[in-house]
Image (cartoon, grey):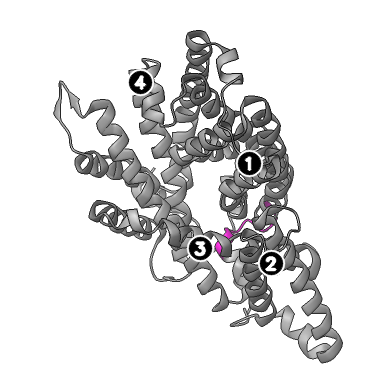
Amino acid sequence: MKLKNLLDEPTDQPVDQERSVSWKNIALIKIGVFISLPGFVTGVKVGNQIGLEASVYVFFIAGIVLGAFASICGSVGARTKLSTYYITQYAFGSRGAHLVNSIFAASLFGWFGINLVLFGKALVDVIGDSALGPFTWEILTIAGAILMISTVIFGFRALDRLSQFAVPLLILSLVVLVYASITQFGLENAAGSADSSSMSAGKAISAVIGGSIVGTVIFPDICRYAISVKHGIIAAIITFSIAKPLITLSSAIPSLATGEREIMAILDALNLGMIALVIVVFTTWTSNNGNLYGASLGLSTIFKGRRYWQLALGSGVVGTLLALSGVMDDILPFLHLLGIAIPPVAGIYIADFYILNGGKYRPFSHSTMAGIRYPSIVAWSLACAAGYASLNDLYVLTTVPALDSVIVAASVLCVLDRILIYVCGNRYADAKKS
């Protein structure tokens, strides 16, 4: 196959049926994204707050909620065959979507850089003083960036191939990690170890859902390749409701058993040097591929004259330079703030697709997009405010701020739509069809 064809990633057109894959491929890609160093931290923190027994309950309840939500989001991608960032153009308008997609891209781009820094510094602990010579975290960060960029520029094909190799290896490594924890320290030690904490089960479930909610919102990016809606839903259930809880639990158990809170300290306590190398390299590789892939797809709706691989390459280089500059240490609060704005986008496009448009959009190439769909912008703004208020305990709807904002976004959009149809009649109805 020619290099030009290998670099051909559909961005502004629906995915052709001959490119479609089964639920297994989609699930493996998404599981690879979930097995990450930040995800490991979530399992460790929550597990040490509430203990092992409660963690089992919390992780699987959160997984059921995420699986249901991901099924709905993914089905929009499976039906339209479009990425999240082109679906938003139907819901927000061509110019309105630029703001939304810029936030998506900035968030994913930021996490790409943060993961690179974590990768370089964690790898120093593993091979920094090996027989190959001394390595600094900067050198290892650059090496990791080259590795990640060299695969993600080839788009979905590369993500698919890498996941088929890396995910089984990562799952095996996690099994070894849990087995070593139990055999060396005992399950009783893990079950009896937990910090004294006021964290309730509701707050713990909220923390787990909040840490993965963005992955459900952008699930159409991968589900657009699904053979059918059924395959997308199966992938959502396998990934979010089964694999995600097990992955999170497999990080909590070793921490509770060893009493350590940092991944490298846990692996060191278990004398798992080679496993440490596999986990650090492949978790960052697969998860960061997902981050850079999503960011590049988002940017493709803004920089329409550029091909996907050019955006991926440019974004990867800039992200690497920012990671090396040290600026990533200061943008975490900004990324968490952006995280409030992302979940309600799903509420908007789900309501727009299934409720306001009857589960069917006109072909993207034949649609004349409105510049800005103001009802969506208003609903999104109110939902962001609601999510922020919920996060700061000013009101409680579901106990999960991200889900609160999704519900508010969808509800407000539907109400505004009914009001505008009543007030403006055919003029508004005709405008929606454009």
Q: Which residue in the rendered view is the most extreme toward the top?
A: 183
Amino acid carrying mark 4 in the image? Asp
Q: Quadrant of residue 139?
A: top left
- Crowd band around label 2 with a 10 angstrom C-alpha radius: few (<14), some (14–19), many (20+): many
> On the rendered image, what quadrant is the N terminus found in?
top left
Amino acid carrying mark 3 in the image? Leu
Mark 2, residue position: 348
Q: Is residue 307 left or right of residue 92?
A: left
- Residue 279: percent from left, percent from top: 40, 28
The earlier-in-sequence mark between 4 and 3 is 4
Helix, strand or loop under label 3: helix
Camera-side mark, 2 or 3: 3
Mark 3, residue position: 338
Amino acid carrying mark 2 in the image? Ile
Camera-side mark, 1 or 2: 1
The earlier-in-sequence mark between 2 and 3 is 3
State whether residue 35 appears in this view: no
Alpha carbon of mark 2 to alpha carbon of mark 3: how far?
17 Å
Q: Is residue 365 rendered magenta in the image? A: no
Q: Nearer the viewer, residue 390 or 355?
A: 390
Q: Are marks 4 and 2 in contact (CB under 8 Å)?
A: no
Alpha carbon of mark 4 to alpha carbon of mark 3: how far?
35 Å
Q: Which residues make up the magenta segment?
A: 78-85
Residue 198: image tag: 1
Q: Is residue 20 above or below residue 396?
A: above
Alpha carbon of mark 1 to alpha carbon of mark 2: how far?
35 Å
Alpha carbon of mark 4 to alpha carbon of mark 2: how far?
46 Å
The earlier-in-sequence mark between 1 and 2 is 1
Q: Are marks 1 and 4 in contact (CB under 8 Å)?
A: no
Q: Are marks 2 and 3 in contact (CB under 8 Å)?
A: no
